Image (tube, rainbow, N blue to C red):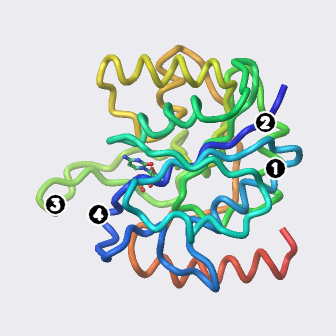
Protein backbone atom coordinates (compact mmCIF):
# COMPACT_ATOMS: atom_id res chain seq x y z
CA UNK A 1 0.00 0.00 0.00
CA UNK A 2 1.41 3.35 -1.04
CA UNK A 3 1.27 6.61 0.91
CA UNK A 4 0.29 9.83 -0.88
CA UNK A 5 -0.46 13.43 0.09
CA UNK A 6 -3.00 15.97 -1.16
CA UNK A 7 -2.45 19.65 -0.36
CA UNK A 8 -5.50 21.83 -1.14
CA UNK A 9 -4.13 25.27 -2.00
CA UNK A 10 -6.88 26.75 -4.18
CA UNK A 11 -8.47 29.00 -1.56
CA UNK A 12 -8.59 32.76 -1.92
CA UNK A 13 -7.74 33.37 1.77
CA UNK A 14 -10.21 36.25 2.04
CA UNK A 15 -9.61 36.69 5.79
CA UNK A 16 -5.92 37.35 5.16
CA UNK A 17 -6.75 40.37 3.08
CA UNK A 18 -3.62 40.59 0.88
CA UNK A 19 -3.29 40.82 -2.89
CA UNK A 20 -2.04 37.21 -3.15
CA UNK A 21 -3.65 34.39 -1.09
CA UNK A 22 -1.93 33.56 2.20
CA UNK A 23 -0.33 30.38 0.85
CA UNK A 24 1.76 32.53 -1.53
CA UNK A 25 3.08 34.87 1.17
CA UNK A 26 6.80 34.74 1.83
CA UNK A 27 7.98 32.85 4.87
CA UNK A 28 11.76 32.92 5.28
CA UNK A 29 13.25 32.49 1.82
CA UNK A 30 10.26 30.48 0.48
CA UNK A 31 6.45 30.67 0.48
CA UNK A 32 3.96 29.32 3.02
CA UNK A 33 2.86 26.73 0.43
CA UNK A 34 6.42 25.54 -0.22
CA UNK A 35 7.01 24.89 3.48
CA UNK A 36 3.64 23.11 3.90
CA UNK A 37 4.38 20.78 0.97
CA UNK A 38 8.00 20.23 1.99
CA UNK A 39 7.04 19.27 5.55
CA UNK A 40 4.30 16.77 4.60
CA UNK A 41 6.60 15.35 1.90
CA UNK A 42 8.95 14.23 4.70
CA UNK A 43 6.62 11.27 5.36
CA UNK A 44 8.76 8.15 4.90
CA UNK A 45 8.22 6.50 1.51
CA UNK A 46 5.74 9.11 0.28
CA UNK A 47 4.90 8.33 -3.36
CA UNK A 48 3.87 11.87 -4.38
CA UNK A 49 1.97 15.04 -3.51
CA UNK A 50 -1.02 16.40 -5.43
CA UNK A 51 -1.28 20.17 -4.96
CA UNK A 52 -4.64 21.76 -5.85
CA UNK A 53 -4.13 25.34 -7.03
CA UNK A 54 -6.12 28.14 -8.62
CA UNK A 55 -5.26 28.35 -12.33
CA UNK A 56 -4.12 31.98 -12.19
CA UNK A 57 -1.94 31.64 -9.08
CA UNK A 58 1.88 31.80 -9.04
CA UNK A 59 2.14 28.14 -8.06
CA UNK A 60 5.05 27.15 -10.31
CA UNK A 61 7.43 29.41 -8.42
CA UNK A 62 5.99 28.36 -5.07
CA UNK A 63 6.53 24.65 -5.83
CA UNK A 64 10.02 24.73 -7.31
CA UNK A 65 12.96 22.97 -5.68
CA UNK A 66 10.98 20.36 -3.74
CA UNK A 67 12.44 16.88 -3.46
CA UNK A 68 9.12 14.96 -3.67
CA UNK A 69 7.16 14.14 -6.85
CA UNK A 70 4.67 17.03 -7.16
CA UNK A 71 1.43 16.85 -9.19
CA UNK A 72 -0.19 20.31 -9.49
CA UNK A 73 -3.84 20.37 -10.61
CA UNK A 74 -6.67 22.86 -10.75
CA UNK A 75 -8.69 22.96 -7.52
CA UNK A 76 -12.46 23.22 -7.12
CA UNK A 77 -14.84 25.88 -5.83
CA UNK A 78 -14.74 24.46 -2.28
CA UNK A 79 -12.05 22.73 -0.32
CA UNK A 80 -13.97 19.44 -0.42
CA UNK A 81 -14.02 19.54 -4.24
CA UNK A 82 -10.33 20.44 -4.38
CA UNK A 83 -9.38 17.44 -2.24
CA UNK A 84 -11.63 15.04 -4.17
CA UNK A 85 -10.06 16.12 -7.48
CA UNK A 86 -6.63 15.55 -5.96
CA UNK A 87 -7.35 11.88 -5.39
CA UNK A 88 -7.89 11.43 -9.13
CA UNK A 89 -4.54 13.03 -9.96
CA UNK A 90 -2.28 10.66 -7.98
CA UNK A 91 -0.78 8.39 -10.69
CA UNK A 92 -1.58 4.71 -10.15
CA UNK A 93 -3.08 5.25 -6.69
CA UNK A 94 -5.30 2.41 -5.43
CA UNK A 95 -8.36 2.50 -3.14
CA UNK A 96 -6.39 0.71 -0.41
CA UNK A 97 -3.57 3.30 -0.43
CA UNK A 98 -3.21 5.88 2.34
CA UNK A 99 -3.62 9.63 1.83
CA UNK A 100 -2.42 12.49 4.02
CA UNK A 101 -4.42 15.69 3.46
CA UNK A 102 -2.54 18.78 4.62
CA UNK A 103 -3.57 22.47 4.56
CA UNK A 104 -1.47 24.66 2.28
CA UNK A 105 -1.62 27.26 5.06
CA UNK A 106 0.06 25.03 7.72
CA UNK A 107 3.79 25.43 7.15
CA UNK A 108 4.92 24.44 10.68
CA UNK A 109 4.26 20.70 10.77
CA UNK A 110 6.83 18.95 12.99
CA UNK A 111 8.34 15.68 11.78
CA UNK A 112 7.59 14.12 15.17
CA UNK A 113 3.85 14.92 14.81
CA UNK A 114 3.82 13.44 11.31
CA UNK A 115 5.44 10.24 12.61
CA UNK A 116 2.90 9.91 15.43
CA UNK A 117 -0.01 10.43 13.05
CA UNK A 118 1.31 7.78 10.65
CA UNK A 119 1.70 5.34 13.56
CA UNK A 120 -1.93 5.92 14.63
CA UNK A 121 -3.53 5.24 11.25
CA UNK A 122 -6.29 2.59 11.25
CA UNK A 123 -9.37 1.83 9.13
CA UNK A 124 -11.25 4.85 10.52
CA UNK A 125 -8.32 7.23 9.88
CA UNK A 126 -6.61 9.72 12.17
CA UNK A 127 -5.93 13.45 12.47
CA UNK A 128 -3.64 15.76 14.40
CA UNK A 129 -5.59 17.84 16.91
CA UNK A 130 -5.29 19.58 20.28
CA UNK A 131 -7.66 19.69 23.25
CA UNK A 132 -9.36 23.10 23.59
CA UNK A 133 -7.59 25.13 26.29
CA UNK A 134 -9.63 28.36 26.34
CA UNK A 135 -13.12 28.90 27.76
CA UNK A 136 -15.58 28.90 24.87
CA UNK A 137 -18.44 31.37 24.44
CA UNK A 138 -21.32 31.43 22.01
CA UNK A 139 -21.69 35.03 20.91
CA UNK A 140 -24.24 37.14 19.09
CA UNK A 141 -23.65 40.81 18.20
CA UNK A 142 -20.50 40.82 20.38
CA UNK A 143 -22.41 39.72 23.51
CA UNK A 144 -21.97 36.39 25.36
CA UNK A 145 -25.03 34.20 25.04
CA UNK A 146 -23.62 31.18 26.84
CA UNK A 147 -20.46 29.31 27.87
CA UNK A 148 -19.81 26.01 26.12
CA UNK A 149 -18.35 23.16 28.21
CA UNK A 150 -14.92 22.49 26.70
CA UNK A 151 -14.50 18.96 28.07
CA UNK A 152 -14.05 16.59 25.14
CA UNK A 153 -13.61 19.40 22.58
CA UNK A 154 -10.59 19.39 20.26
CA UNK A 155 -9.24 21.73 17.59
CA UNK A 156 -8.74 19.81 14.35
CA UNK A 157 -5.39 20.30 12.58
CA UNK A 158 -3.85 18.70 9.54
CA UNK A 159 -2.44 16.41 8.27
CA UNK A 160 -5.39 14.04 8.39
CA UNK A 161 -4.80 10.45 7.30
CA UNK A 162 -7.35 8.19 5.60
CA UNK A 163 -7.57 5.23 3.26
CA UNK A 164 -8.05 6.60 -0.24
CA UNK A 165 -11.26 4.65 -0.95
CA UNK A 166 -12.83 5.71 2.35
CA UNK A 167 -11.91 9.33 1.77
CA UNK A 168 -13.25 9.32 -1.79
CA UNK A 169 -16.60 7.85 -0.68
CA UNK A 170 -16.84 10.32 2.23
CA UNK A 171 -16.12 13.38 0.05
CA UNK A 172 -18.47 12.27 -2.74
CA UNK A 173 -21.31 11.74 -0.25
CA UNK A 174 -20.66 15.06 1.50
CA UNK A 175 -20.77 16.89 -1.85
CA UNK A 176 -23.94 15.03 -2.89
CA UNK A 177 -25.87 16.27 0.17
CA UNK A 178 -24.21 19.70 0.31
CA UNK A 179 -22.75 19.06 3.78
CA UNK A 180 -20.64 21.86 5.29
CA UNK A 181 -17.24 20.15 5.28
CA UNK A 182 -14.32 22.19 6.62
CA UNK A 183 -12.00 19.23 7.10
CA UNK A 184 -11.79 15.69 5.72
CA UNK A 185 -12.52 14.06 9.09
CA UNK A 186 -15.98 15.64 9.20
CA UNK A 187 -16.82 13.96 5.89
CA UNK A 188 -15.49 10.60 7.16
CA UNK A 189 -17.42 10.96 10.45
CA UNK A 190 -20.62 11.25 8.37
CA UNK A 191 -19.96 7.65 7.22
CA UNK A 192 -20.20 6.55 10.87
CA UNK A 193 -16.43 6.12 11.27
CA UNK A 194 -14.51 7.47 14.29
CA UNK A 195 -11.05 8.76 13.27
CA UNK A 196 -8.37 8.80 15.98
CA UNK A 197 -7.54 12.16 17.53
CA UNK A 198 -3.75 12.34 17.75
CA UNK A 199 -2.62 15.09 20.15
CA UNK A 200 -0.28 17.34 18.18
CA UNK A 201 1.87 20.39 18.88
CA UNK A 202 0.05 23.67 19.35
CA UNK A 203 2.54 25.40 17.10
CA UNK A 204 1.17 23.59 14.00
CA UNK A 205 -0.63 26.84 13.26
CA UNK A 206 -2.79 27.72 10.25
CA UNK A 207 -1.91 31.04 8.66
CA UNK A 208 -5.16 33.00 8.66
CA UNK A 209 -4.28 36.62 9.52
CA UNK A 210 -1.18 38.67 8.60
CA UNK A 211 0.21 38.50 12.16
CA UNK A 212 0.29 34.68 11.92
CA UNK A 213 3.17 34.94 9.42
CA UNK A 214 5.56 36.40 11.98
CA UNK A 215 4.63 33.70 14.45
CA UNK A 216 5.14 30.99 11.80
CA UNK A 217 8.64 32.30 11.09
CA UNK A 218 9.52 31.95 14.78
CA UNK A 219 8.04 28.43 14.94
CA UNK A 220 9.88 27.31 11.81
CA UNK A 221 13.20 28.49 13.24
CA UNK A 222 12.41 26.56 16.45
CA UNK A 223 11.58 23.37 14.51
CA UNK A 224 14.81 23.71 12.53
CA UNK A 225 16.81 24.28 15.71
CA UNK A 226 15.21 21.21 17.33
CA UNK A 227 15.73 19.20 14.13
CA UNK A 228 12.07 18.13 13.92
O1 LIG B 1 -9.98 28.97 4.26
P1 LIG B 1 -9.28 27.88 4.99
O2 LIG B 1 -8.05 28.35 5.69
O3 LIG B 1 -10.16 27.05 5.86
O4 LIG B 1 -8.76 26.89 3.84
C1 LIG B 1 -8.13 25.67 4.17
C2 LIG B 1 -7.38 25.12 2.98
O5 LIG B 1 -8.27 24.76 1.93
C3 LIG B 1 -6.38 26.12 2.41
O6 LIG B 1 -5.18 25.41 2.18
C4 LIG B 1 -7.07 26.57 1.12
O7 LIG B 1 -6.15 26.97 0.11
C5 LIG B 1 -7.80 25.31 0.70
N1 LIG B 1 -8.93 25.53 -0.23
C6 LIG B 1 -8.90 24.93 -1.50
N2 LIG B 1 -9.92 25.14 -2.41
C7 LIG B 1 -10.95 25.96 -2.10
C8 LIG B 1 -10.98 26.60 -0.81
C9 LIG B 1 -9.97 26.34 0.10
O8 LIG B 1 -7.96 24.22 -1.81
N3 LIG B 1 -11.87 26.17 -3.01
Q: Are marks 2 and 1 in contact (CB under 8 Å)?
A: yes
The first of marks 2 and 3 along the sequence is 2
Q: Earlier in the sequence, mark 1 or mark 3?
A: 1
Q: Is residue 3 left or right of residue 171?
A: right
The CB of the residue at mark 4 lies under 8 Å from ligand 1: yes
Report the residue marked by disc 3: 143
Between 108 and 33, which is closer to the camera in this rendering?
33
Question: Decide: marks 3, 4 in contact (CB < 8 A)?
Answer: no
Q: Are marks 1 and 3 in contact (CB under 8 Å)?
A: no
> SS class of the residue under badge 1?
loop
Rounded to the nearest angstrom, the CA distance separating label 1 from label 3 is: 45 Å
Instruction: Identify the residue at horizontal 74%, vertical 44% (top origin).
Output: 48
The mark that comes first in sequence, 2 or 4, is 2
Residue under the point 72% across and 27% down: 93
Upstream in the sequence, badge 3 or badge 4? 4
Q: Nearer the viewer, mark 1 or mark 3?
A: 1
Q: Is residue 205 above or below residue 132?
A: below
Instruction: Compare residues 124 and 47 and report the one nearer the observer.
Output: 47
Label 3 environment density (alpha carbons within 10 Å; few <14, some 14–19, many ≥20): few
Residue 149 position, x and y percent, is 42, 44
Query: Would residue 94 be found to the left or right of residue 142 on screen?
Result: right
CA gap, disc 2 and disc 4? 32 Å
Is 109 positioned to the left or the right of 215 in the image? right
Q: Which residue is mark 4?
A: 14
Disc number for residue 43: 1
Per the image, the residue denoted by label 2 is 3
Tell me which label, 4 or 1, sits earlier in the chain. Answer: 4
Disc 1 crowd rating (10 Å Cα; few below 14, some 14-19, many 20+) is some
Q: Secondary structure at mark 2?
A: strand
Mark 2 → mark 1, Cα distance in angstroms? 8 Å
Task: Quadrant for the C terminus, please.
Answer: bottom right
Amino acid sequence: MALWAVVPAAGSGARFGAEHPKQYQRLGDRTVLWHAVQRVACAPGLAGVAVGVAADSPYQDALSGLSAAIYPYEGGAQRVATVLRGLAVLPGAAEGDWVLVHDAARPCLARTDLDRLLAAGGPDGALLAAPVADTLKRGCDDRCLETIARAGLWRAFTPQLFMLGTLRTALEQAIAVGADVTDESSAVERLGLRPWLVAGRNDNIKITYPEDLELAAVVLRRLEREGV
